[in-house]
Image (cartoon, helix red, strand yellow):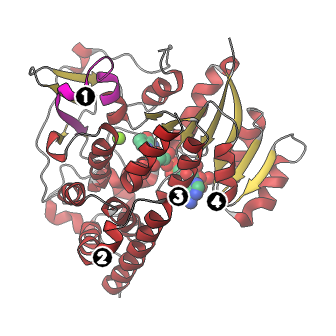
C-alpha cells in the first residue's frame, strides 16, 4: 500500500486534533508533511515530532523562537507567519485538511488547490467568502474539494451516484445551540461561557458560540449554496435537538435521503480522509431503539436573526459573503471580550451589510478583492462595536 502524504492546517484545533487522532490509529497509511497552528506551540511541536512531520508552522511570527526551541533535537523544520502557512499548504501532498478558523483559512486553502491537492474543507468561511474562486481554482487545477462540515459531508454522501439536477431541496439540521430553549428576553444577559457550552457537539469556542447565535448555520446555508450550486430557495435549515440526522436531500420524485450518525466529527473527517473508500472508524454505532424518537421544528428567525441575514447574503451574491463573515468575526470578538451583548452581534452584522459601499460587494471575485471587502467590513464592524460599547 502506498502511503499518502498529508498536511493539516489548523492542526492544534478541535478539527485538527480529531484528524490527528484518526491518523495515529492508521499510521501505516500516512506520511505527515506539514502541521500548522497559531498560539498553541507546545501541542504543535509535540504532534510534529511524534508524527515526524517535515515542517511545523505557527501563524505568529513572534512565536518562532518558542517553536524552534520546542522542536530542538528533532528533524522538523520550523516556520512562522501567514506566508509560511501558505508555503506549507503548497508542499507536495496528496491531501490537505483546511481547519484554520475564520477567513485566515482562505489563502492557504486556495494555495493547496493551486498545487492540485485534494482539499478536505472544514473551514466553511472560505466558501462563504469566496466560494466561486475556490471552486474555479479547484476546477482549473484538477483538484478536488471534499466537505468536512458534518451537514455538507452528509449531503455529499447522500448525493453519491445521484444527479444534482434531480435534487429538489437540501435541508440541513441545527441543534439550536446553548440558548435553544431560553426566553428571548434573557438573551441580552447571556455570557460567552454560557454560549460556549454546546448541548451535543464538542467543538472550538468560536464555532460553539456561533451555534448558539446560529451564525454557524447561517454560514452553512451559504456554504450549501456555494458548494452544491443549488439556489437559495432550495435550501432550508431545521432545528433538530438530537443532532443525529445531519442533513436531508429531497429529490424530485419526493424521496428524502437522510444521513444519520453520532455527533462525532471523526465521522465526517474520516469519510474525507478515506474517500473514495470507507474504512472502519472509531465512532459510536447508534442504537435506534434506545434513541426512541427524533424531533424537528422550524427555526424562529426572531431568536436567530442570523438565518434571515444569510438569505439576504445569498440573494445579494458577489462579495457579500466576505462582508458578512468579516462583520460576524468582529461581532463575535466583541461578544467574547464583553463589549457587546449576545443579540447585538446580529445587529452589528446587519448594519455593516446595509452600510457597506456596494462597489466592494460587486467587485470581481479575486483574493485581493475578497481581502479588501473583508478589511472594509472589519473596519466598519469595529467602529460600530466601539460606538455601542462606549
Ligand atoms: P479551533 O478554534 O479549535 O482551532 C482553530 C485552529 O486554527 C487552531 O489550530 C488555531 O491555532 C488555528 N488558528 C487560529 N487563528 C489562526 C490564524 N489567524 N492563522 C492561522 N491559524 C490560526 O477551531 P475548530 O477546529 O473548531 O474549527 C476549525 C474550522 O473548522 C472552522 O472553520 C470551523 O467553522 C470548522 N468546523 C469545525 C467543526 C468542529 O467540530 N470543531 C465542525 C465543522 C466545521 P492555535 O489553537 O494554535 O491558536
Ligand atoms: Mg456543521
Q: Is residue 334 left or right of residue 252?
A: right
Magenta includes 166?
yes
Q: Is residue 216 above or below residue 330?
A: above
Where does residue 114 sit, x and y in percent of width and height? 57, 44
- Circle 3/circle 2 CB separation < 8 Å: no
Instruction: Using residue 253 as the reference point, say whether residue 345 is left or right of it.
Output: right
Checking the image for residue 82, the label placed there is: 4
Q: CA distance from mark 3 to mark 2?
A: 21 Å
Question: Dot 4: what SS?
Answer: helix
Q: Position of residue 386 (x, y in %)?
A: 38, 84
Determine which of the numbered discs, if any, sits on residue 98 in the image: none
Q: Tell whether position 229 is magenta.
A: no
| Quarter holding ligand 2 | top left
Q: Does the Cβ of the disc 1 residue fall within 8 Å of ligand 2?
A: no
**Label whose residue precedes the other's in the sequence (2 or 4):** 4
The quadrant holding residue 288 is top left
Depth check, mark 3 against mark 2: the one in front is 2
Q: Which residue is mark 2?
A: 356
- Tell me if mark 4 has few (under 14), some (14-19) or many (20+) residues whose alpha carbon lies within 10 angstroms of its own: some
Q: Which residue is mark 3?
A: 104
Q: Secondary structure at mark 1?
A: helix
Name the disc covering residue 164, or none. Answer: 1
Please identify the residue farthest to the front as the structure is shown: 140
Q: Quadrant of the N terminus?
A: top right
Disc 1 or disc 4, which is closer to the eye? 1
Asked if the residue at tag 3 contacts the one at tag 4, i.e. Cβ–Cβ closer than 8 Å, the answer is yes
| Label 2, residues with CA under 10 Å away: few <14, some 14-19, many ≥20 | some
Task: Return the disc, 1 or 4, that comes first in the chain's sequence.
Answer: 4
Amino acid at each position: 500500500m502506498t502511503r499518502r502524504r498529508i498536511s493539516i492546517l489548523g492542526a492544534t484545533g478541535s478539527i485538527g486534533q480529531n484528524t490527528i487522532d484518526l491518523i495515529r490509529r492508521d499510521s501505516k497509511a500516512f506520511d505527515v508533511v506539514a502541521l500548522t497552528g497559531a498560539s498553541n506551540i507546545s501541542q504543535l511541536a509535540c504532534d510534529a515530532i511524534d508524527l515526524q512531520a517535515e515542517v511545523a508552522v505557527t501563524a505568529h511570527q513572534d512565536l518562532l523562537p518558542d517553536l524552534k526551541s520546542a522542536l530542538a533535537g528533532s528533524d522538523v523544520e520550523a516556520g512562522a507567519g501567514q506566508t509560511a502557512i501558505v508555503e506549507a499548504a503548497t508542499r507536495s501532498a496528496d491531501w490537505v485538511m483546511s481547519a484554520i478558523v475564520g477567513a485566515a483559512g482562505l489563502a492557504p486553502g486556495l494555495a493547496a488547490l493551486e498545487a492540485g491537492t485534494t482539499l478536505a474543507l472544514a473551514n466553511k468561511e472560505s466558501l462563504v467568502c469566496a466560494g466561486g474562486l475556490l471552486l474555479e481554482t479547484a476546477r482549473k487545477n484538477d483538484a478536488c474539494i471534499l466537505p468536512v462540515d458534518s451537514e455538507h459531508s452528509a449531503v455529499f454522501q447522500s448525493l453519491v451516484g445521484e444527479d444534482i439536477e434531480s435534487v429538489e431541496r437540501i435541508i440541513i439540521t441545527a441543534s439550536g445551540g446553548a440558548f435553544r430553549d431560553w426566553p428571548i428576553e434573557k438573551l441580552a444577559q447571556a455570557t460567552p461561557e454560557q454560549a460556549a457550552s454546546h448541548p451535543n457537539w464538542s467543538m472550538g469556542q468560536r464555532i460553539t458560540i456561533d451555534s448558539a447565535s446560529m451564525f454557524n448555520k447561517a454560514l452553512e446555508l451559504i456554504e450549501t449554496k456555494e458548494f452544491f450550486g443549488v439556489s437559495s430557495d432550495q435550501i432550508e435549515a431545521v432545528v433538530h435537538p438530537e443532532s443525529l440526522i445531519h442533513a436531508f436531500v429531497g429529490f424530485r420524485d419526493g424521496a428524502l435521503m437522510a444521513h444519520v450518525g453520532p455527533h462525532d466529527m471523526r465521522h465526517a473527517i474520516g469519510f474525507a480522509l478515506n474517500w473514495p473508500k470507507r474504512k472502519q472508524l472509531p465512532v459510536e454505532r447508534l442504537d435506534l431503539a434506545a434513541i426512541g424518537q427524533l424531533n424537528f421544528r422550524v427555526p424562529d428567525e426572531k431568536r436567530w436573526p442570523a438565518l434571515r441575514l444569510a438569505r439576504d447574503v445569498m440573494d445579494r451574491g458577489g462579495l457579500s459573503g466576505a462582508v458578512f463573515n468579516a462583520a460576524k468575526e468582529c461581532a463575535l470578538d466583541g461578544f467574547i471580550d464583553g463589549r457587546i451583548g449576545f443579540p447585538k452581534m446580529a445587529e452589528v452584522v446587519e448594519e455593516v451589510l446595509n452600510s457597506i459601499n456596494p462597489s466592494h460587494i460587486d467587485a470581481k471575485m479575486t483574493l485581493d478583492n475578497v481581502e479588501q471587502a473583508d478589511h472594509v467590513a472589519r473596519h466598519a464592524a469595529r467602529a460600530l462595536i466601539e460606538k455601542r460599547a462606549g
